[in-house]
Amino acid sequence: MGRQERHRKVLRPLLRAGIEVLPEPAPASAIPHVLGWERERSFGFCLVDYRDPRFVERLNAAWYDLATSSGLIDENGEFLLMLPRGTWTAEEDRRRRTMHVWRRVRLLDRWDLMGAGAASFLGVRSGHPGFAALALDNSVWLLTDTYETGAAVYAVRDPATSPDVLHTLESVAKENFYKDPHFQREALSWLATHGPQR
């Protein structure tokens, strides 16, 4: 898989959505993303109804308001975003259903994560997003998902200190229920280096 193919299949669609994928790797301390955290860690939930005539615009605004107020985006506009491991199109990625990995990205001046982004790697189609972002310092996960009546954004405080998240990571490390050996190794490595001391 060459550089041109990666640019055509992955980087260009993300650039159209206003996301620049940076060459620097994600920090080693970045906690692998898993489901499961204590309800009290969630905050800033905002649901936008599909019937809203300005649905994509309002969902973009809700995401940005929460991203800036929660500290997701640093002073350089950078954060971590879950993206495919390989070099394939968004459609191929959806068929593969493999676990994504953190990539360091920068939010550009003009962006559309809920429209153009959701049509590429950040959802299933325009207006139907589903993606996770992480602050570079692990302080917050920002999640976007679709529901029956609309799409929502919400945040989770300090996922790396969540007992439920740590328990899920330990389960992944033991059982690999996501059926992804790369992700299992990442969970094991993160727990060994950054997990709670035994």
Image (cartoon, rainbow, N blue to C red):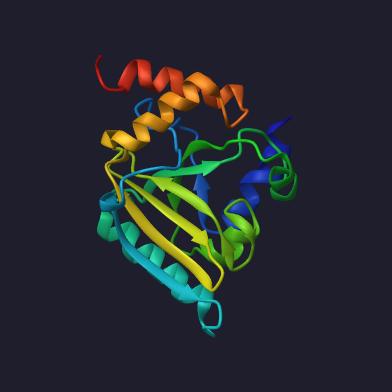
Task: Between residue 37 and residue 72, name the one nearer to us.
Answer: 37
Of the 4 image quadrants, the one containing the C terminus is top left
Left or right: residue 160 compared with residue 90:
left
Q: From this viewpoint, which residue is outermost toward the bottom?
A: 53
Q: Position of residue 67 (x, y in %)?
A: 34, 57
Inspect this view and state whether residue 100 appears: yes
The answer to whether residue 8 is seen in the rendering is no
| Residue lying at 35% horizontally and 64% vertically, measured from the top left | 45
How many circles with numbers are drawn on the protein? 0
**Which image quarter: residue 138?**
top left
Snapshot quadrant of residue 128: bottom right
Measuring from the top left, give residue 171's x and y in whole percent.
45, 26
For image coordinates 51% across by 83% down, the residue present is 52
User: Which residue is located at x 33 percent, y 39 percent?
Assistant: 136
Classify 78 as above or below 144: above
Residue at 64 percent of width and 53 percent of height: 13
